[in-house]
């Protein structure tokens, strides 16, 4: 019997996951196994190939030259397998392997969380990992299959699939705040208000953007509170701490319940649609395509529902 006949397909996929995660522990978490089982599987694979694939220390795992070469060849092979399965739309083809996503917080709340129940129903065997991260990152270098960002933040060498229509950024405040401090009628009046500052994932302060004569215009606003989390910003805004700059879709419930009100509505700023993006070098994981379809269908139904209100 040839040596290759005794190698398990699952061990090869596990090896690729280790190369991506650079950790037995993280790989075990991703695949739902124990670190000892992952380590044992890699020893078995190395024994059967007769080659050392991984350098192991107490703090890290890294591929050897032979390991890197094998990983590259396996990646191409799995890409071809994935492409074949993608074109084969039989029941169950979207149930393979693992899927790692990196999404920013608003997208996680608006798009991913509502899609999870249906995704779990359609792809029960997929190990889905969703990392909520507002940093600008290289999803390929950091081991993710796909990410969600605004269209203009997607690198040019990536394939981008729109999930939503254009998004609207608005300025909002609580009725209590407006009663105490007054409602601004012009953008220049924001200088007399406390504006909740937005901290970006790279720790830079975000300049609000408003529509002036149909053009997107960045402005500086005063404020004593800086927050890098949308949920906390909404809570602070509802508590009357100041005027916040938020995605309108993110505060749809608060606006409907009138716990928040939009101010300077004519100066709301349009933003690119949210996109799922992934490397053109990687195959389109069937489960990723399922998730995209679920999100887009839910967005379409929500749009129809809003139009009937």
Image (cartoon, rainbow, N blue to C red):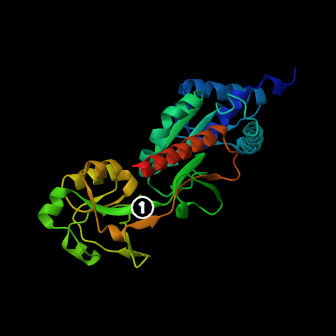
Residue at the extreme top: 1
User: Label 1, on which residue?
Assistant: 168
The structure residue drawn at horizontal position 52% and vertical position 58%, both measured from the top left corner, is 273
**Which of the 4 image quadrants contains residue 13?**
top right
The structure residue drawn at horizontal position 82% and vertical position 28%, both measured from the top left corner, is 4
Using the rendered image of the protein, determine whether residue 123 is visible from the camera's viewpoint: no
Residue at the extreme right: 1
Residue 227: horizontal and vertical position, in percent?
Answer: 30, 57
**Which of the 4 image quadrants contains residue 241?**
bottom left
* Crowd tier of the residue under label 1, counting other residues whose Cα lies within 10 Å: few below 14, some 14–19, many 20 or above: some
Residue at the extreme front: 308
Residue 289: horizontal and vertical position, in percent?
Answer: 63, 42
Above or below, 128 against 307 in this view is above
Quick one: quadrant of the N terminus? Answer: top right
The structure residue drawn at horizontal position 34% and vertical position 75%, both measured from the top left corner, is 219
Q: Is residue 181 left or right of residue 90?
A: left
Using the rendered image of the protein, determine whether residue 250 is visible from the camera's viewpoint: yes
Say which of 144 and 164 sits in front: 164
Say which of 90 and 51 sits in front: 90
Above or below, 257 against 154 in this view is above
**Which of the 4 image quadrants contains residue 35?**
top right
The structure residue drawn at horizontal position 60% and vertical position 27%, both measured from the top left corner, is 125
């Amino acid at each position: 019997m040839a040596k290759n006949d005794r190698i398990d397909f699952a061990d090869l996929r596990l090896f690729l996951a280790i190369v991506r995660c650079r950790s037995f522990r993280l790989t075990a978490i991703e695949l739902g196994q124990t670190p000892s089982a992952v380590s044992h599987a890699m020893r078995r694979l190395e024994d059967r190939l007769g080659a050392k694939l991984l350098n192991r220390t107490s703090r890290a795992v890294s591929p050897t030259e032979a390991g890197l070469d094998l990983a590259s060849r396996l990646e191409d092979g799995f890409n071809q397998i994935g492409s074949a399965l993608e074109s084969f739309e039989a029941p169950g083809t979207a149930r393979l392997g693992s899927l790692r996503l990196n999404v920013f917080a608003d997208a996680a709340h608006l798009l991913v969380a509502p899609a999870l129940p249906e995704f779990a129903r359609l792809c029960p065997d997929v190990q889905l990992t969703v990392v909520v991260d507002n940093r600008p990152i290289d999803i390929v270098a950091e081991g993710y299959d796909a990410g969600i960002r605004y269209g203009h933040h997607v690198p040019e060498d990536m394939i981008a699939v729109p999930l939503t229509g254009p998004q609207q950024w608005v300025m909002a405040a609580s009725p209590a705040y407006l009663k105490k401090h007054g409602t601004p009628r012009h953008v220049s009046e924001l200088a007399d208000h406390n504006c909740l500052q937005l901290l970006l994932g790279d720790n830079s302060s975000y300049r609000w953007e408003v529509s002036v004569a149909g053009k997107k215009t960045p402005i500086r606003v005063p404020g004593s509170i800086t927050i890098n989390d949308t949920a906390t910003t909404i809570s602070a805004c509802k508590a009357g701490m100041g005027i916040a700059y938020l995605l309108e879709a993110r505060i749809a419930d608060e606006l409907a319940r009138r716990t928040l009100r939009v101010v300077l509505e004519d100066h709301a700023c349009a933003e690119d649609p949210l996109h799922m993006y992934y490397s053109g070098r990687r195959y389109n994981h069937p489960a990723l395509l399922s998730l995209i379809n679920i999100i887009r269908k839910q967005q379409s139904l929500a749009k129809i529902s809003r139009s009937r209100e």
